[in-house]
Image: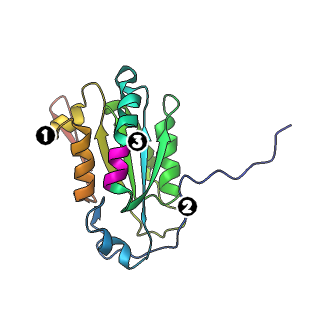
Amino acid sequence: MASPATPRPALIRPRASRSRSQLGAVSLASDHAAATASSGRRRDFVFVVNPSGANGRTGKQWKQLLPFLHTRLADQCNICECITSGPSHAIDVTREAIKDGADAVIAVGGDGTLHEVVNGFFWKGSPVRALDRGPDHLTALGLIPLGTGSDFARTFGWSNDPRQAIDRIVRGFFLATLSSYSIYVDSSSVSK
């Protein structure tokens, strides 16, 4: 006999909906006052950590980084740490965080962790949306590279130093909403 459904625990506390004057860009952390002044709330950042990344080094490095992270970000946002428990867990955690209204989901690990987090932004080919923040709410994607190679970060010329990644988040690099994409497979491009 199936047990009655229990409500799922929220990764972050739901907040009132807010308006966004610039729908084309999302700031991870800089200009905190401007981003929260109209809503009167702290932003919610969810860090999705793969403790098994880099043969277990990611989990150890993450524990060492936490004090630095809290020193740099705790006064600007609510920090939620989600430790993954196995393959594809980061996908589920990311989807739940977005549905709960996270302002940013930050992958902590290597390219595999980033891959799962990016996949969590989508469900059946469509972007996942916050349930109670309105259609204008956007969730930013961030990365703290703690993987073996971290090829994605290297491709963009980013250092693999996790403290520099945290500083990039604090400075608030802006992410633009993309309306198209290109996929290159064997030198041929597919655009949408």
Please tell me which of labels 2 and 3 falls first in the chain: 2
Residue lying at 22% horizontally and 31% vertically, measured from the top left: 151
Which secondary structure dominates the residues rendered in magenta? Answer: helix
Judging by the rendered image, the residue that carries numbered circle 3 is: 117
Please identify the residue farthest to the bottom as the structure is shown.
Answer: 38
Task: Report the mark closest to the observer, 2 or 3.
Answer: 2
Q: Is residue 69 highlighted in magenta?
A: yes
Residue lying at 32% horizontally and 32% vertically, measured from the top left: 110
Residue lying at 23% horizontally and 36% vertically, measured from the top left: 152
Q: Determine whether the residue tagged by mark 1 lies in a helix, strand or loop.
A: loop
Judging by the rendered image, the residue that carries numbered circle 2 is: 13
Please identify the residue farthest to the right as the structure is shown.
Answer: 1
Three-letter amino acid code at disc 1? Gly
> How far is the residue under mark 3 from the one under mark 1?
21 Å
> How far is the residue under mark 2 from the one under mark 3?
20 Å
75 versus 152 height, above or below: below
Q: Position of residue 60 (x, y in %)?
A: 39, 29
The stretch of residues the image draws in magenta is 67-72
160 versus 165 height, above or below: above
Between 101 and 134, which is closer to the camera in this rendering?
101
Q: Determine whether the residue tagged by mark 3 lies in a helix, strand or loop.
A: helix
| Circle 1 Cα neighbour tier, 10 Å, few/some/many (<14 / 14–19 / ≥20) | few
Q: Quadrant of residue 49?
A: top left
Q: Is residue 158 highlighted in magenta?
A: no
Task: Report the mark closest to the observer, 1 or 2.
Answer: 2
Judging by the rendered image, the residue that carries numbered circle 1 is: 157
